[in-house]
Amino acid sequence: MESAGKRQENHCLNALKGIACMGVVFCHALFPGEFGDVIFVLASAAVPIFFLISGFYAYDSDRVIVVQKTVRRFRKTVKLTVGACLLYFVWKFVKLWLLGYSVLDGIGDFNLKNLVKMLLQNDLSFIEAGHFWFLLALIYAYATLIILAKWNMIHWIYPVIILTFIGRVYMCGNANWHYSQNYWFDGLPYFFTGYYLKANENWKDNISNGFLLVIGMMGILFKTSGLFYVLGVYIYEVGAILF
């Protein structure tokens, strides 16, 4: 029942997820020189692609089924996130102890400021788990979809996507990556773009793969040259999932 619990296997998207997994690795294990810079720019599409695919698979023509399967995914992601964060919480204090510091030295990080940053920016750096921002953003995306689907208001999110991408243009120029890599400027726009693409996938039948390939190459050019960077990011990543 994904119409009752099962979804049709999409081998192309599975392959894309595999490429995106490698992209995440290349974002954190950098190659040297200009070659490394190009690889990093291309690999930076990895996480948005995961959001796109998550939104793509969240769609169903029956909004009751959308709620049912999204609630399941929400609960599963919450359990995974809580478990992973607990491990990092424990490791934080074990690390302090191994380095000869007092456990009390880490208590000060658990304050209102960091709590607000976690809730608003999905910033988990205070437990040295900043890379888990993706899980928090995905939880927010699932929660938003559940609410919108229950009240039959999903169509209202699409104008918001445009606004978030406009905001993303500014946020991506900020030196602090937490301002752009969070639910508001990464998870929300890409997740619901993926949902929209699935909901309106029939129009793709009138577009050739060659055209999508050209669009994707344009996106790569924009990304690697720094010209219209955010536009290039969007074209490149959306082109990848459509192709």
Image (cartoon, grey):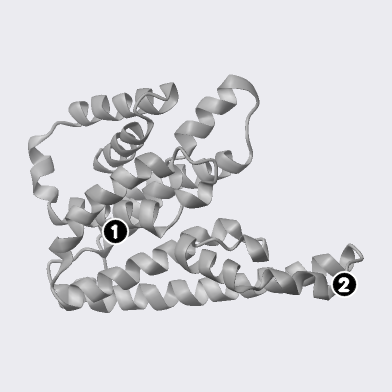
Give the residue type at disc 2.
Ser
The numbered disc on residue 55 is 1
| Element class at badge 2 | loop
Residue placed most toward the observer, 172 or 146 = 172
Q: Residue at x 88, y 66 (%)?
A: 98
Give the residue type at disc 1.
Gly
Is 143 drawn above or below residue 134 in the view shown? below
Residue 210 locus on image (x, y percent): 20, 26
Is 21 drawn above or below residue 81 in the view shown? above
Q: Residue at x 30, y 24 (%)?
A: 218
**Residue 66 left/right relative to 133:** left
Residue 208 locus on image (x, y percent): 14, 31
Q: Mark 1 packing: few (<14 Cα in 10 Å), some, or many (20+)? A: many
Quarter location, residue 67: bottom left
The single residue placed furthest to the right in the displayed view is 100
Q: Residue at x 74, y 74 (%)?
A: 107
Q: Does the image show residue 121?
A: yes
* The C terminus, quarter of image: top left
Q: Does the image show residue 1?
A: no
Residue 102 locus on image (x, y percent): 87, 72
Q: Which residue is mark 2?
A: 102
Q: Residue at x 13, y 41 (%)?
A: 204
Distance CA(mark 2)–CA(mark 1):
44 Å
* The N terminus, quarter of image: bottom left
Quarter location, residue 182: bottom left
Residue placed most toward the observer, 53 or 167 = 167
